[in-house]
Image (cartoon, helix red, strand yellow):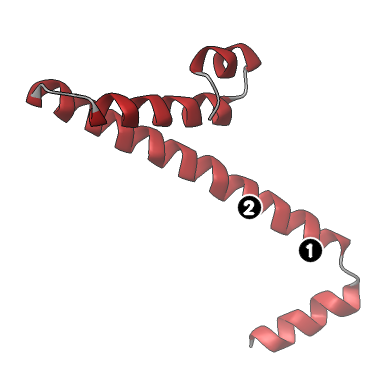
Amino acid sequence: MTNLVDAAKSGNKKEILIAMRDKLAETIQNCDSGRDMASNTKRLMEVVNEIETIEAKEAEEAEKKKAHKQSKFDRLKKKNEDR
């Protein structure tokens, strides 16, 4: 688990969000106030959605790179298989 301060210093948005997610989860687990739990839970879900969006974009980019590296024959073969 990455420290939130270290993640912030890295400037990597995904690392920051992951550290925030972990910190929020810890805060929620130790929370006694219903009001605080509600707001922290809402923020946790927002952070999780942001992480999922970043990961989906990363997967899409990786797939594009993979497809680009394939030969024309391989791309046509895959296209025919998908039909």
Which of pointers 1 and 2 lies earlier in the amino acid sequence? Answer: 2
Which labelled disc corresponds to residue 59? 2
Which labelled disc corresponds to residue 75? none
Q: Which residue is mark 1?
A: 67
Could you tell me which secondary element the residue under label 2 belongs to? helix
Q: Residue at x 87, y 67 (%)?
A: 70
Look at label 2 and name its amino acid: Ala
Classify 6 as above or below 83: above
Q: Residue at x 39, y 39 (%)?
A: 48
Q: Is residue 72 left or right of residue 45?
A: right
Classify 7 as above or below 74: above
Pick the quarter of the image with the C terminus: bottom right
- The residues tagged by marks 1 and 2 sit, at their Cα atoms, a distance apart of 12 Å
Q: Residue at x 85, y 77 (%)?
A: 74
Nearer to the camera, 38 or 62: 38
Could you tell me which secondary element the residue under label 1 belongs to? helix
Look at label 1 and name its amino acid: Ala
Q: Is residue 66 left or right of residue 45?
A: right
Nearer to the camera, 79 or 44: 44
Q: Residue furthest left?
A: 34
Classify 8 as above or below 67: above
- Res 34 quadrant in image: top left
Q: Is residue 80 left or right of residue 57?
A: right
